[in-house]
Every structure is written in C-alpha cells, then in structure tokens.
Image: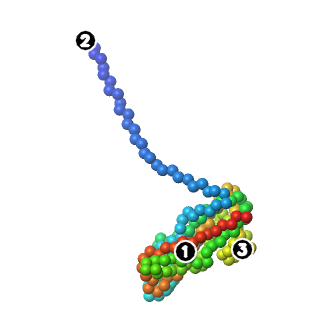
C-alpha cells in the first residue's frame, strides 16, 4: 500500500475595508455658531402681492395673497455655549434684505425666534442689546443651547423669478 503525502490547501482569507468620515463641532464657551440658514423655499408669485412666513419652532411655512408654496422651508438654527443659569441677551435684525436677479429685492420682516427648550425668557422686548431687551437664562446643565430664527418674507405682485439671497447677524451678549 502506498502512502503518499497529503497536500492540504490553505483556505484563502478575504478581507474588506470601508472608510467612513467622522466629524465634531467643538463649541467655545461664550460663542455662537450658525447650524442652518433660514430658507423660504420655492414658491410662485402672482399678480397679487403676498407673504411667506416661516414658523421658528416647526420650520413650516404659510402663505398669503397670491403666493403658491412648493415647500422647502425651514428656520435658521444657532447654537451657543455658556454655563447653566447664565443670563444672556439676544439681538435679532428688524429686517433682512434679499436680492435677486437684476437687483430685484424682497424684505423679511417680523423676525422672530423660538428658544424652547434651552432658554428661559426673563423679560424685555425689541431687537437691541440695551437694558430690558430680550433677556434669557440658559437651561441645560451642559450650558449648550439652541434657538431658531424665522420671519415673514414680503413677495411683490409679479415678483421677478430667480434665486434671492441675503444675510443677517444674530448677536448674543453673555452676562
């Protein structure tokens, strides 16, 4: 009887590698960052003037007049950091100018914000940083807070079609 060597074949190991990205945002104490911009979405103007209003809490929009909304609205969102129970003042613009094709303009008025659940309203009104103006207290133990900003966009009768853009500043004064 012949006994020969047995040749065993090694199992071939297979590997696969995938790459993913990771990111983080470190919020500096007494700081403010913009997480998301204010968007009034896509809409059609008509021969009748109207408005598009974005709700700062839900980000949903409503229209008036001859404006027909096609969606895509959301409020702007900001994140800041202080310490729990720190008092701060928030200043919003009174209007925001948007410029479109050929220099056509639209104006955002009734600029509002939603601070729940991260900020307690302590009193005041108006848009400035002076005494008695929009004072808040930071609620979260971490000191990190979010708030949303929205407003009402005036759309003219026969508003020129195209993309309209603008910018606005929100100021937080930590006390």
Instruction: Give how far across and how far down residue 157 sits, in percent.
Output: 46, 86
The residue that disc 2 covers is 1
* Secondary structure under the numbered disc 2 in the rendered image: loop
Residue 128's quadrant in the figure? bottom right
Quarter that holds the C terminus: bottom right
Read off the residue under disc 1.
Answer: 54
| Distance from Cα at disc 1 to Cα at disc 3 | 27 Å
Q: Residues within 10 Å of mark 3 (few under 14, many from 20)?
A: few
- From the image, state whether disc 3 or disc 2 is nearer to you: 3
Q: Residue 130 — which label?
A: 3
Q: Horizontal placement of 171 versus 9: left or right?
A: right
How far separated are the C-alphas under marks 1 and 2? 91 Å
First-in-chain label (1 vs 3): 1
Q: CA distance from mark 3 to mark 2?
A: 105 Å
Give the structural element (helix, strand or loop) at label 1. Answer: strand
Front-lying residue, 11 or 99? 99
């Amino acid at each position: 009887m012949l006994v020969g060597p047995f040749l065993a074949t090694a199992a071939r190991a297979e590997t696969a590698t995938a790459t993913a990205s990771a990111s983080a945002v470190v919020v500096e104490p007494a700081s403010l960052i913009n997480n998301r911009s204010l968007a009034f979405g896509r809409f059609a103007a008509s021969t009748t003037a109207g408005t598009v209003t974005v709700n700062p809490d839900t980000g949903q929009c409503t229209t008036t007049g001859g404006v027909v909304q096609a969606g895509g609205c959301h409020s702007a969102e900001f994140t800041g950091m202080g310490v729990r129970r720190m008092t701060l003042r928030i200043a919003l613009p009174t209007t925001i100018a948007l410029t479109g094709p050929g220099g056509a303009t639209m104006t955002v008025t009734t600029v509002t914000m939603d601070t729940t659940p991260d900020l307690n309203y302590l009193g005041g009104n108006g848009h400035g940083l002076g005494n008695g103006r929009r004072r808040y207290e930071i609620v979260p133990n971490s000191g990190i807070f979010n708030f949303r900003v929205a407003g009402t966009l005036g759309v003219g009768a026969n508003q020129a079609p195209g993309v309209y853009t603008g910018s606005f500043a929100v100021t937080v004064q930590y006390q």
